Amino acid sequence: MPFFRELFLTHSVTQSIVLLTMVVFLGLWAGEHLRIKKFSFGVTWILFIGIAISSFGVTIDENVSSFAKNLGLILFIYSIGLQVGPSFSPFDKSGLRLNLLALAIVILGCITTIVLHFLTGIDMSTMAGIMSGAVMNTPSLGAVQQTASDLLGFVSPNIAMGYALAYPLSIVGLILSFEIIRFCCRVNLTKEDEKLRQEHVSDDDPICVDIRLSIPEAITLEQLHKLCPVSNMLVSRVTHQDGKDELVDTTTMLYPNDVVRIVSDKRHEKDLQVLGEITHYGFRGKERSNHLISRRIVVTRTECNGKRLSTFDVRHRYHATITRINRAGVELLATPDFVLQLGDRIMVVGDRDDVRHVADIFGNELKRLDLPNLMPIFFGIFLGVLVGSLPIAIPGMNISFKFGLAGGALIVALLIGRFGPYYNMVTFATTSANMMLRQVGLTLFLAAVGLSVGDGFIPTIANGGYMWIIYGFAITMIPLIIVGFLAYKGMRINYFKVIGLLTGAMTGAPALGYAQSLSNHNDQASVIYATVYPLTMFLRVMAGQLLVVLFCA
């Protein structure tokens, strides 16, 4: 008995490790096995089990708990920012409208929270915790707790309790919003899928066309560009009338009826037809030539990170052509000023020996990508803590605002992930390594939070805390219904894109599986989710902190 008392009840480093790992294990087990049909609360079970255990008086040392929460939160939020950073461009042409709608959802959620604060008299720190649960955003919870601690000198357990009470119905509310829009607007999923298929691809997407030249006489590549002045037109090869394939460079002569292969943007498809008739459209699965091959080469040499394609002069030095680049599943045009990142997959065309030489230049050693790059992780976390701790004066108020550990880590991670390669910083990490870091941080944070708030959980519910569930449900539903109907009926956005937007704006990974199940024949829900997720995550982390600063100071 003394052994178990010391191991589970007496505060020590050993006891903290035992309880944290036990709560994480039980929570992960529950997430795997306790389901309602296909639905599960996933890792959030860790929080619920931590609360249940601590409600019996089993807790860990306060200092250890604070360290575990902060470290876990930083690892979680930093790994998210580092992964989405390379594609973080929320205000580009394609993502601007969707991100503005996501911003509207965040703002409406904050307005609903403020209204409930004045109607109910509940302090804003608790309401911010309820809002964090209502939007399924764990980093926001951590940011609210830290801001409340900096501003008020203590962390109210009601913040985490509000999160825990609002979270379960937030998932239900998100899924329910899908069905309400679908029912009220009489959405036919089959027709929506057909409409999606008929939509044109993005003008920025790379296309490949074979064109039979209708020129009166032999010309050079330079003269061909003058006939069709498309700035990002890449001529990769030519097939002469005798059937011989040849890579094109400045010395190649092009003759009437030769077939040239050109890679460019979708927007220039009609412009390219001034050169002749398009005989084939799209990237071929197999090459026609016996001596020319196409091969995907992975950039694995750190010396190539952050370098422009023109630096390597592949066409003239190795008589090979780089036509396009795949980054995180997105096909990009291989322009001379394109900046490479570790992990990019480049398409190279040329003779076997030439392509082999190009592969040696860029590395193409997949095992090297398995080694984690720890330096940018720890350096970025260090910078994130500094940025998050900097006081920012608020005009007209005697207090200063801080981004906090979560906000600082997210900002630095996004910046490093987006611009790091331009300064020769290696930011690539395999998906499995990133997910491991993220999940370790999240589970550690949830376990520490759960074990620190359970003492007053039952009394809080008994004394009116059950109403927090209703308030959280209102914060979830009101923005989703308003923006959902506006997007589908008012702006005529495809239904699958709308549910992806709603899921991303709520950072609702637990409901993403349901959204994907509705769109069996396309991946638009996931694509739009990824489009709005980075900016929304940043806004969610900032929103909770701002509410606490503005209404609790």
Image (tube, rainbow, N blue to C red):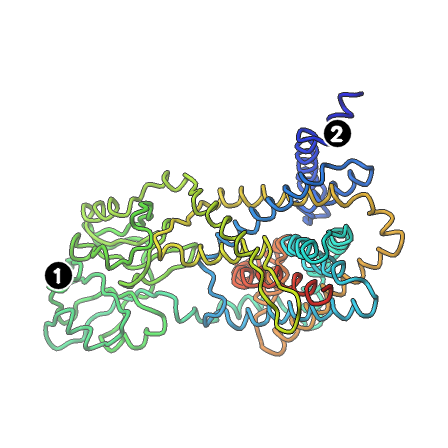
Examine the rendered structure and indicate whether residue 319 appears above or below residue 119: above
Q: Quadrant of the C terminus?
A: bottom right
Q: Secondary structure at mark 2?
A: helix
Examine the rendered structure and indicate whether residue 273 appears above or below residue 463: below
Percent x, y for residue 124? 75, 63
Percent x, y for residue 144? 68, 57
The answer to which image quadrant residue 404 occupies is: bottom right
Looking at the rendered structure, the kind of residue marked 1 is: Asp
Relative to the observer, which residue lies in front, 73 or 510? 73
Looking at the rendered structure, the kind of residue marked 2 is: Phe
**Between marks 2 and 1, how big is the CA–CA gap?**
82 Å
Look at 83% across and 66% down and name the residue there.
Answer: 121
Find residue 265 and name its label.
Answer: none
The answer to which image quadrant residue 21 occupies is: top right
Q: Which residue is mark 1?
A: 242
- Residue 511 visible? The answer is no
Q: Which residue is mark 2?
A: 8
Look at 24% across and 76% down and name the residue there.
Answer: 229
Look at 34% across and 57% down and name the residue there.
Answer: 325
Mark 2 vs 1, N-terminal side: 2
Label 2 neighbour load within 10 Å: few <14, some 14-19, many 20+: some
- Residue 490 visible? The answer is yes
